Amino acid sequence: MENKGFGENFTWGCATASYQIEGAAREDGKGPSIWDMMCRWEGKIFNRDTGDTACDHYHRYAEDVGIMRDLGLGAYRFSISWPRVLPEGTGRVNEKGLAFYDRLVDALLEGGVTPYATLFHWDYPYELFCRGGWLNSDSPLWFAEYADVIVDRLGDRVKHWMTMNEPQCFLGFGHVTGTHAPGLKLDWAEYLRATHHALLAHGRAAQAIRVRSGDTAMIGWAPVGVVRMPASDSAESVELARRAMFAMEKKDFWVNSWFMDPVFLGKYPEDGLKAFGSAAPDVRAGDMDIISTPVDFLGLNIYNGQTIESNGSGGWRAVEKAPGHALTNFHWPVTPGCLYWGPKFLHERYGKPIVITENGLSSTDWVHTDGQVHDPSRIDFLRRYLRELRRAKNDGVDVRGYFQWSLLDNFEWAEGYKHRFGLVHIDYGTFKRTPKDSATWYKEVIASNGTAL
Protein backbone atom coordinates (compact mmCIF):
# COMPACT_ATOMS: atom_id res chain seq x y z
CA MET A 1 0.00 0.00 0.00
CA GLU A 2 2.82 2.41 0.87
CA ASN A 3 4.30 2.10 -2.63
CA LYS A 4 1.06 2.92 -4.42
CA GLY A 5 1.69 6.65 -4.18
CA PHE A 6 -1.26 8.96 -4.83
CA GLY A 7 -2.51 7.52 -8.11
CA GLU A 8 -3.02 9.13 -11.48
CA ASN A 9 -3.93 12.79 -11.94
CA PHE A 10 -3.13 13.76 -8.36
CA THR A 11 -2.36 17.48 -8.04
CA TRP A 12 0.73 18.61 -6.13
CA GLY A 13 0.94 22.30 -5.33
CA CYS A 14 1.72 25.13 -2.95
CA ALA A 15 -0.54 27.88 -1.64
CA THR A 16 -0.25 31.56 -0.78
CA ALA A 17 -2.56 34.53 -0.09
CA SER A 18 -2.54 37.99 -1.66
CA TYR A 19 -2.13 40.20 1.41
CA GLN A 20 0.49 37.89 2.89
CA ILE A 21 2.88 38.05 -0.07
CA GLU A 22 2.04 40.73 -2.63
CA GLY A 23 3.05 43.97 -0.95
CA ALA A 24 2.49 47.02 -3.19
CA ALA A 25 -0.24 48.00 -0.74
CA ARG A 26 -0.77 51.44 -2.24
CA GLU A 27 0.52 51.01 -5.79
CA ASP A 28 -1.18 51.08 -9.17
CA GLY A 29 -4.57 52.15 -7.88
CA LYS A 30 -5.08 49.48 -5.22
CA GLY A 31 -7.62 50.43 -2.56
CA PRO A 32 -7.12 49.78 1.17
CA SER A 33 -8.23 46.56 2.82
CA ILE A 34 -9.25 45.90 6.40
CA TRP A 35 -5.78 44.45 6.98
CA ASP A 36 -4.19 47.71 5.85
CA MET A 37 -6.49 49.31 8.42
CA MET A 38 -5.60 46.90 11.20
CA CYS A 39 -1.88 47.25 10.61
CA ARG A 40 -2.28 50.93 11.55
CA TRP A 41 -3.76 50.06 14.94
CA GLU A 42 -1.38 50.26 17.85
CA GLY A 43 -0.66 46.91 19.45
CA LYS A 44 -2.64 44.74 17.01
CA ILE A 45 0.23 43.29 14.94
CA PHE A 46 3.41 41.76 16.31
CA ASN A 47 6.38 44.15 16.11
CA ARG A 48 4.20 46.72 14.30
CA ASP A 49 4.74 44.71 11.12
CA THR A 50 2.59 45.46 8.08
CA GLY A 51 1.81 43.92 4.71
CA ASP A 52 2.95 47.05 2.90
CA THR A 53 5.79 45.21 1.15
CA ALA A 54 5.44 41.61 2.44
CA CYS A 55 7.39 39.40 0.00
CA ASP A 56 7.17 41.97 -2.82
CA HIS A 57 5.53 39.28 -4.94
CA TYR A 58 3.73 42.01 -6.90
CA HIS A 59 7.05 42.96 -8.46
CA ARG A 60 8.80 39.58 -8.21
CA TYR A 61 6.06 37.21 -9.34
CA ALA A 62 8.12 36.04 -12.34
CA GLU A 63 10.94 34.94 -10.05
CA ASP A 64 8.45 33.15 -7.82
CA VAL A 65 6.86 31.35 -10.76
CA GLY A 66 10.36 30.27 -11.78
CA ILE A 67 10.79 28.72 -8.33
CA MET A 68 7.47 26.90 -8.73
CA ARG A 69 8.59 25.55 -12.07
CA ASP A 70 11.91 24.40 -10.60
CA LEU A 71 10.05 22.59 -7.82
CA GLY A 72 7.92 20.74 -10.35
CA LEU A 73 4.66 22.08 -8.93
CA GLY A 74 1.62 20.94 -10.84
CA ALA A 75 -0.51 23.76 -9.44
CA TYR A 76 -0.36 27.01 -7.50
CA ARG A 77 -3.14 28.22 -5.25
CA PHE A 78 -3.15 32.00 -4.99
CA SER A 79 -5.75 34.53 -3.94
CA ILE A 80 -6.87 37.73 -5.60
CA SER A 81 -6.94 41.00 -3.70
CA TRP A 82 -10.50 42.30 -3.93
CA PRO A 83 -9.50 45.96 -3.31
CA ARG A 84 -6.66 45.73 -5.83
CA VAL A 85 -9.25 45.04 -8.52
CA LEU A 86 -12.18 47.06 -7.13
CA PRO A 87 -10.63 49.80 -4.97
CA GLU A 88 -13.98 50.73 -3.42
CA GLY A 89 -15.19 47.12 -3.37
CA THR A 90 -17.85 47.75 -6.02
CA GLY A 91 -18.20 49.90 -9.12
CA ARG A 92 -14.97 51.22 -10.61
CA VAL A 93 -12.61 48.51 -11.87
CA ASN A 94 -8.88 49.08 -11.52
CA GLU A 95 -7.36 47.95 -14.81
CA LYS A 96 -3.81 47.89 -13.43
CA GLY A 97 -4.90 45.55 -10.67
CA LEU A 98 -6.53 43.15 -13.11
CA ALA A 99 -3.49 43.33 -15.36
CA PHE A 100 -1.29 42.03 -12.55
CA TYR A 101 -3.34 38.84 -12.29
CA ASP A 102 -3.31 38.56 -16.08
CA ARG A 103 0.48 38.55 -15.98
CA LEU A 104 0.59 36.08 -13.10
CA VAL A 105 -1.81 33.61 -14.73
CA ASP A 106 -0.01 33.82 -18.06
CA ALA A 107 3.34 33.22 -16.37
CA LEU A 108 1.96 30.21 -14.51
CA LEU A 109 0.56 28.64 -17.67
CA GLU A 110 3.79 29.30 -19.57
CA GLY A 111 5.66 27.55 -16.76
CA GLY A 112 3.36 24.52 -16.83
CA VAL A 113 1.76 25.35 -13.47
CA THR A 114 -2.04 25.15 -13.22
CA PRO A 115 -3.58 28.22 -11.52
CA TYR A 116 -6.04 27.63 -8.66
CA ALA A 117 -7.60 31.00 -7.82
CA THR A 118 -9.22 31.90 -4.49
CA LEU A 119 -11.51 34.91 -4.68
CA PHE A 120 -11.34 35.88 -1.01
CA HIS A 121 -8.53 35.27 1.46
CA TRP A 122 -9.41 37.84 4.11
CA ASP A 123 -8.37 41.20 2.56
CA TYR A 124 -11.86 42.68 2.55
CA PRO A 125 -12.17 46.17 0.98
CA TYR A 126 -11.98 48.91 3.61
CA GLU A 127 -14.63 51.01 1.87
CA LEU A 128 -17.14 48.17 2.13
CA PHE A 129 -16.23 47.63 5.77
CA CYS A 130 -17.24 51.26 6.30
CA ARG A 131 -20.63 50.32 4.85
CA GLY A 132 -21.10 47.47 7.30
CA GLY A 133 -18.94 44.76 5.76
CA TRP A 134 -20.32 41.25 6.15
CA LEU A 135 -23.06 42.62 8.40
CA ASN A 136 -24.62 44.42 5.44
CA SER A 137 -27.28 42.35 3.68
CA ASP A 138 -25.93 43.64 0.36
CA SER A 139 -22.52 42.04 0.99
CA PRO A 140 -23.35 38.85 -0.97
CA LEU A 141 -24.25 41.02 -3.97
CA TRP A 142 -21.01 42.98 -3.62
CA PHE A 143 -19.08 39.72 -3.63
CA ALA A 144 -20.98 38.44 -6.65
CA GLU A 145 -20.15 41.64 -8.56
CA TYR A 146 -16.47 41.14 -7.71
CA ALA A 147 -16.66 37.49 -8.82
CA ASP A 148 -18.18 38.57 -12.13
CA VAL A 149 -15.28 40.94 -12.80
CA ILE A 150 -12.63 38.35 -11.99
CA VAL A 151 -14.14 35.43 -13.86
CA ASP A 152 -14.89 37.56 -16.91
CA ARG A 153 -11.22 38.51 -17.03
CA LEU A 154 -9.47 35.29 -16.02
CA GLY A 155 -12.02 32.57 -16.72
CA ASP A 156 -10.67 31.84 -20.20
CA ARG A 157 -7.46 30.57 -18.56
CA VAL A 158 -8.32 29.78 -14.93
CA LYS A 159 -10.45 26.65 -14.58
CA HIS A 160 -10.04 25.90 -10.86
CA TRP A 161 -11.72 28.25 -8.39
CA MET A 162 -12.27 28.60 -4.66
CA THR A 163 -14.76 31.17 -3.44
CA MET A 164 -13.32 31.93 -0.01
CA ASN A 165 -10.77 30.77 2.53
CA GLU A 166 -11.39 29.72 6.14
CA PRO A 167 -14.70 31.39 7.04
CA GLN A 168 -14.27 30.10 10.59
CA CYS A 169 -11.21 32.34 10.90
CA PHE A 170 -12.13 35.56 9.14
CA LEU A 171 -15.55 35.56 10.78
CA GLY A 172 -14.62 34.20 14.21
CA PHE A 173 -11.27 35.88 14.76
CA GLY A 174 -12.41 38.99 12.89
CA HIS A 175 -15.87 39.41 14.43
CA VAL A 176 -15.88 37.58 17.80
CA THR A 177 -12.41 37.63 19.35
CA GLY A 178 -11.24 40.74 17.50
CA THR A 179 -7.73 39.36 17.02
CA HIS A 180 -7.95 39.57 13.22
CA ALA A 181 -9.27 42.26 10.92
CA PRO A 182 -11.67 43.99 11.12
CA GLY A 183 -11.05 43.62 14.86
CA LEU A 184 -14.68 43.42 16.00
CA LYS A 185 -16.02 41.79 19.17
CA LEU A 186 -19.64 41.13 18.33
CA ASP A 187 -22.37 39.27 20.13
CA TRP A 188 -23.49 35.96 18.64
CA ALA A 189 -26.50 37.38 16.80
CA GLU A 190 -24.39 39.86 14.84
CA TYR A 191 -21.66 37.28 14.23
CA LEU A 192 -24.21 34.81 12.85
CA ARG A 193 -25.71 37.52 10.65
CA ALA A 194 -22.25 38.11 9.16
CA THR A 195 -21.74 34.36 8.80
CA HIS A 196 -25.01 33.90 6.94
CA HIS A 197 -24.13 36.71 4.55
CA ALA A 198 -20.70 35.19 3.91
CA LEU A 199 -22.32 31.84 3.11
CA LEU A 200 -24.70 33.58 0.72
CA ALA A 201 -21.69 35.31 -0.85
CA HIS A 202 -20.05 31.92 -1.40
CA GLY A 203 -23.17 30.64 -3.13
CA ARG A 204 -23.58 33.70 -5.33
CA ALA A 205 -19.91 33.54 -6.33
CA ALA A 206 -20.25 29.86 -7.20
CA GLN A 207 -23.22 30.76 -9.40
CA ALA A 208 -21.24 33.55 -11.08
CA ILE A 209 -18.33 31.23 -11.83
CA ARG A 210 -20.64 28.57 -13.27
CA VAL A 211 -22.53 31.03 -15.45
CA ARG A 212 -19.38 32.62 -16.81
CA SER A 213 -17.13 29.55 -17.11
CA GLY A 214 -19.69 26.80 -17.69
CA ASP A 215 -19.13 23.15 -17.00
CA THR A 216 -15.39 23.42 -17.60
CA ALA A 217 -14.88 25.21 -14.26
CA MET A 218 -14.00 23.25 -11.13
CA ILE A 219 -15.47 25.10 -8.16
CA GLY A 220 -14.84 24.62 -4.47
CA TRP A 221 -14.12 26.49 -1.30
CA ALA A 222 -11.59 26.12 1.52
CA PRO A 223 -12.94 26.05 5.09
CA VAL A 224 -10.91 24.87 8.04
CA GLY A 225 -11.19 21.15 8.64
CA VAL A 226 -11.73 20.92 12.41
CA VAL A 227 -10.57 17.35 13.02
CA ARG A 228 -11.47 14.94 15.79
CA MET A 229 -9.53 11.67 15.86
CA PRO A 230 -10.33 8.37 17.59
CA ALA A 231 -8.21 7.17 20.49
CA SER A 232 -8.13 3.68 18.95
CA ASP A 233 -9.19 1.90 15.76
CA SER A 234 -12.15 0.21 17.45
CA ALA A 235 -15.52 0.72 15.81
CA GLU A 236 -16.82 2.43 18.95
CA SER A 237 -13.92 4.86 19.12
CA VAL A 238 -14.14 5.70 15.42
CA GLU A 239 -17.88 6.35 15.65
CA LEU A 240 -17.37 8.58 18.68
CA ALA A 241 -14.80 10.67 16.80
CA ARG A 242 -17.09 10.85 13.77
CA ARG A 243 -19.93 12.22 15.90
CA ALA A 244 -17.60 14.68 17.61
CA MET A 245 -16.43 16.01 14.22
CA PHE A 246 -19.86 17.38 13.43
CA ALA A 247 -21.56 17.93 16.79
CA MET A 248 -22.40 21.40 18.15
CA GLU A 249 -23.03 21.25 21.87
CA LYS A 250 -22.45 24.95 22.52
CA LYS A 251 -22.09 28.33 20.84
CA ASP A 252 -18.84 28.10 18.92
CA PHE A 253 -17.33 29.26 15.63
CA TRP A 254 -14.61 26.60 15.54
CA VAL A 255 -16.85 23.94 14.00
CA ASN A 256 -17.45 22.06 10.76
CA SER A 257 -21.19 21.53 10.43
CA TRP A 258 -22.38 25.12 10.84
CA PHE A 259 -20.31 26.14 7.80
CA MET A 260 -20.37 22.99 5.69
CA ASP A 261 -23.89 21.59 6.16
CA PRO A 262 -25.52 24.62 4.49
CA VAL A 263 -23.13 24.39 1.52
CA PHE A 264 -23.42 20.64 0.96
CA LEU A 265 -26.68 19.64 2.66
CA GLY A 266 -28.71 22.83 2.22
CA LYS A 267 -29.51 23.42 5.89
CA TYR A 268 -28.05 24.47 9.20
CA PRO A 269 -27.47 21.59 11.65
CA GLU A 270 -30.31 21.12 14.13
CA ASP A 271 -27.99 20.95 17.15
CA GLY A 272 -26.36 24.20 16.00
CA LEU A 273 -29.72 25.95 15.75
CA LYS A 274 -30.53 24.70 19.24
CA ALA A 275 -27.17 25.85 20.62
CA PHE A 276 -27.45 29.35 19.13
CA GLY A 277 -31.13 29.68 19.97
CA SER A 278 -32.54 33.16 19.38
CA ALA A 279 -29.18 34.36 18.02
CA ALA A 280 -29.55 32.14 14.94
CA PRO A 281 -29.76 34.10 11.68
CA ASP A 282 -32.91 34.89 9.77
CA VAL A 283 -33.00 32.46 6.84
CA ARG A 284 -35.16 33.79 4.06
CA ALA A 285 -36.88 31.82 1.34
CA GLY A 286 -34.33 30.84 -1.28
CA ASP A 287 -31.28 31.51 0.88
CA MET A 288 -30.33 27.86 1.24
CA ASP A 289 -30.82 27.28 -2.49
CA ILE A 290 -28.18 29.94 -3.10
CA ILE A 291 -25.81 28.74 -0.38
CA SER A 292 -26.01 25.12 -1.57
CA THR A 293 -25.29 25.93 -5.21
CA PRO A 294 -23.52 22.75 -6.40
CA VAL A 295 -19.73 22.80 -6.24
CA ASP A 296 -17.20 20.26 -7.42
CA PHE A 297 -14.84 19.74 -4.50
CA LEU A 298 -14.28 20.45 -0.83
CA GLY A 299 -11.02 22.21 -0.07
CA LEU A 300 -9.73 21.64 3.45
CA ASN A 301 -7.15 23.56 5.44
CA ILE A 302 -5.91 21.09 8.04
CA TYR A 303 -2.95 21.61 10.37
CA ASN A 304 -3.75 19.52 13.44
CA GLY A 305 -6.45 17.51 15.15
CA GLN A 306 -7.69 16.56 18.58
CA THR A 307 -7.86 12.98 19.84
CA ILE A 308 -11.02 12.28 21.79
CA GLU A 309 -12.24 9.49 24.03
CA SER A 310 -15.45 8.53 25.82
CA ASN A 311 -16.28 10.53 28.93
CA GLY A 312 -18.10 7.53 30.35
CA SER A 313 -21.57 9.04 30.03
CA GLY A 314 -22.26 8.90 26.32
CA GLY A 315 -20.22 11.93 25.36
CA TRP A 316 -16.55 12.62 24.73
CA ARG A 317 -13.59 14.52 26.02
CA ALA A 318 -10.17 15.41 24.69
CA VAL A 319 -7.39 12.96 25.46
CA GLU A 320 -4.87 14.72 27.64
CA LYS A 321 -1.58 15.21 25.83
CA ALA A 322 1.63 13.89 27.31
CA PRO A 323 4.07 16.37 28.83
CA GLY A 324 6.54 17.57 26.23
CA HIS A 325 4.38 16.56 23.26
CA ALA A 326 5.52 17.79 19.85
CA LEU A 327 4.59 21.37 19.00
CA THR A 328 5.26 23.61 16.03
CA ASN A 329 6.60 27.13 16.50
CA PHE A 330 2.98 28.29 16.56
CA HIS A 331 2.45 25.94 19.52
CA TRP A 332 0.12 23.82 17.41
CA PRO A 333 0.32 20.09 18.22
CA VAL A 334 1.90 17.75 15.69
CA THR A 335 -0.88 15.25 14.90
CA PRO A 336 -0.29 13.53 11.52
CA GLY A 337 -3.45 11.41 11.83
CA CYS A 338 -5.57 14.50 11.15
CA LEU A 339 -4.80 14.10 7.43
CA TYR A 340 -6.32 10.63 7.58
CA TRP A 341 -9.38 11.12 9.77
CA GLY A 342 -10.28 14.62 8.61
CA PRO A 343 -10.59 13.80 4.89
CA LYS A 344 -12.20 10.45 5.73
CA PHE A 345 -14.99 11.81 7.94
CA LEU A 346 -15.67 14.86 5.75
CA HIS A 347 -15.77 12.82 2.55
CA GLU A 348 -18.16 10.34 4.17
CA ARG A 349 -20.55 13.10 5.28
CA TYR A 350 -20.53 15.32 2.18
CA GLY A 351 -19.56 12.96 -0.64
CA LYS A 352 -17.33 15.47 -2.40
CA PRO A 353 -13.79 15.01 -3.71
CA ILE A 354 -11.28 16.36 -1.21
CA VAL A 355 -8.41 18.74 -1.93
CA ILE A 356 -6.06 19.62 0.92
CA THR A 357 -5.77 23.33 0.25
CA GLU A 358 -3.41 24.11 3.15
CA ASN A 359 -1.11 22.06 5.37
CA GLY A 360 2.28 22.90 6.84
CA LEU A 361 3.99 24.35 9.87
CA SER A 362 5.81 27.31 11.31
CA SER A 363 9.36 26.26 12.08
CA THR A 364 12.61 27.85 13.26
CA ASP A 365 14.31 28.72 9.98
CA TRP A 366 17.24 30.98 9.18
CA VAL A 367 20.06 31.13 6.65
CA HIS A 368 22.94 29.07 8.02
CA THR A 369 26.62 29.90 7.68
CA ASP A 370 26.79 27.79 4.52
CA GLY A 371 24.21 30.03 2.88
CA GLN A 372 21.48 27.36 3.01
CA VAL A 373 18.33 26.97 5.09
CA HIS A 374 18.20 23.59 6.82
CA ASP A 375 14.73 22.71 8.11
CA PRO A 376 14.67 18.99 8.98
CA SER A 377 11.66 19.43 11.27
CA ARG A 378 9.54 20.61 8.32
CA ILE A 379 10.60 17.63 6.24
CA ASP A 380 9.75 15.23 9.05
CA PHE A 381 6.41 16.94 9.69
CA LEU A 382 5.36 16.84 6.04
CA ARG A 383 6.50 13.24 5.61
CA ARG A 384 4.40 12.12 8.57
CA TYR A 385 1.31 14.05 7.45
CA LEU A 386 1.55 13.04 3.80
CA ARG A 387 1.88 9.38 4.75
CA GLU A 388 -1.46 9.68 6.54
CA LEU A 389 -3.06 11.42 3.57
CA ARG A 390 -1.74 8.66 1.32
CA ARG A 391 -3.28 6.11 3.69
CA ALA A 392 -6.63 7.88 3.41
CA LYS A 393 -6.47 7.84 -0.38
CA ASN A 394 -5.45 4.19 -0.46
CA ASP A 395 -8.38 3.42 1.86
CA GLY A 396 -10.80 4.86 -0.68
CA VAL A 397 -11.11 8.53 0.27
CA ASP A 398 -11.40 10.58 -2.92
CA VAL A 399 -8.41 12.88 -2.37
CA ARG A 400 -7.57 14.83 -5.52
CA GLY A 401 -4.75 17.16 -4.47
CA TYR A 402 -2.43 18.59 -1.84
CA PHE A 403 -1.27 22.21 -1.51
CA GLN A 404 1.55 22.81 0.94
CA TRP A 405 1.35 25.99 3.00
CA SER A 406 3.26 27.87 2.01
CA LEU A 407 5.49 28.47 -0.99
CA LEU A 408 7.06 31.53 0.67
CA ASP A 409 7.64 32.76 4.19
CA ASN A 410 5.13 35.57 4.54
CA PHE A 411 3.14 38.05 6.64
CA GLU A 412 1.36 35.85 9.17
CA TRP A 413 -1.54 38.18 9.97
CA ALA A 414 -1.55 39.34 13.61
CA GLU A 415 1.75 37.52 14.11
CA GLY A 416 3.50 39.71 11.54
CA TYR A 417 6.74 38.16 10.33
CA LYS A 418 7.32 36.14 13.50
CA HIS A 419 6.48 32.81 11.85
CA ARG A 420 8.01 31.14 8.81
CA PHE A 421 5.76 28.66 7.01
CA GLY A 422 7.47 28.66 3.62
CA LEU A 423 9.43 26.18 1.58
CA VAL A 424 11.35 29.26 0.48
CA HIS A 425 13.04 31.60 2.95
CA ILE A 426 12.44 35.34 2.47
CA ASP A 427 14.89 38.00 3.60
CA TYR A 428 12.44 40.82 4.24
CA GLY A 429 15.18 43.44 3.91
CA THR A 430 16.47 42.39 0.49
CA PHE A 431 13.62 40.08 -0.64
CA LYS A 432 16.19 37.42 -1.50
CA ARG A 433 14.58 34.02 -2.00
CA THR A 434 16.44 30.98 -0.63
CA PRO A 435 14.78 27.59 -1.15
CA LYS A 436 15.03 25.53 2.01
CA ASP A 437 16.03 21.88 2.25
CA SER A 438 12.32 21.10 2.45
CA ALA A 439 11.83 22.58 -1.02
CA THR A 440 14.31 20.08 -2.48
CA TRP A 441 12.62 17.30 -0.52
CA TYR A 442 9.14 18.32 -1.73
CA LYS A 443 10.40 18.37 -5.30
CA GLU A 444 11.44 14.72 -4.90
CA VAL A 445 8.08 13.81 -3.37
CA ILE A 446 6.27 15.40 -6.31
CA ALA A 447 8.49 13.66 -8.86
CA SER A 448 7.73 10.31 -7.21
CA ASN A 449 3.99 11.09 -6.81
CA GLY A 450 4.36 10.36 -3.12
CA THR A 451 6.10 7.00 -3.32
CA ALA A 452 9.28 8.61 -1.93
CA LEU A 453 7.62 9.22 1.43
Image (tube, rainbow, N blue to C red):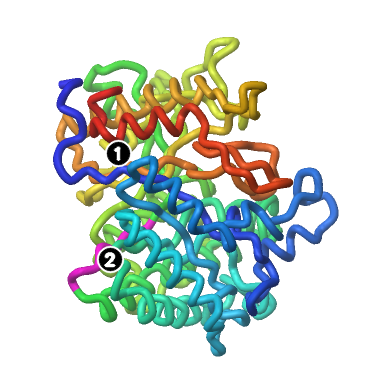
For the N terminus, the quadrant is top left
On whether residue 216 falls in the magenta region, the answer is yes
Measured as percent of width and height from the top left, residue 190 is found at 60, 65
Closer to the eye: label 1 or 2: 2
Measured as percent of width and height from the top left, residue 274 is found at 44, 53
Residue depicted at x 61% and y 73%: 125
299 horizontally vs 327: left or right: left
- Between 70 and 253, the one nearer to me in the picture: 70
Instruction: Give the magenta-colored segment's residue range.
Output: 215-221
Residue assigned mark 1: 343
318 horizontally vs 292: left or right: right
Check the image and name the residue furthest to the bottom: 91
Residue assigned mark 2: 159
Measured as percent of width and height from the top left, residue 432 is found at 63, 44
In three-dimensional space, the C-alpha distance between marks 1 and 2, rounded to whole angstroms, equals 23 Å
Residue depicted at x 47% and y 42%: 405
Q: Is residue 406 above or below residue 388?
A: below
Measured as percent of width and height from the top left, residue 263 is found at 33, 61
Mark sitting on residue 63: none
Give, as a three-letter code, the residue at label 1.
Pro
Check the image and name the residue furthest to the top: 323
Whichever of labels 1 and 2 marks the residue nearer the N terminus, that label is 2
Give, as a three-letter code, the residue at label 2.
Lys
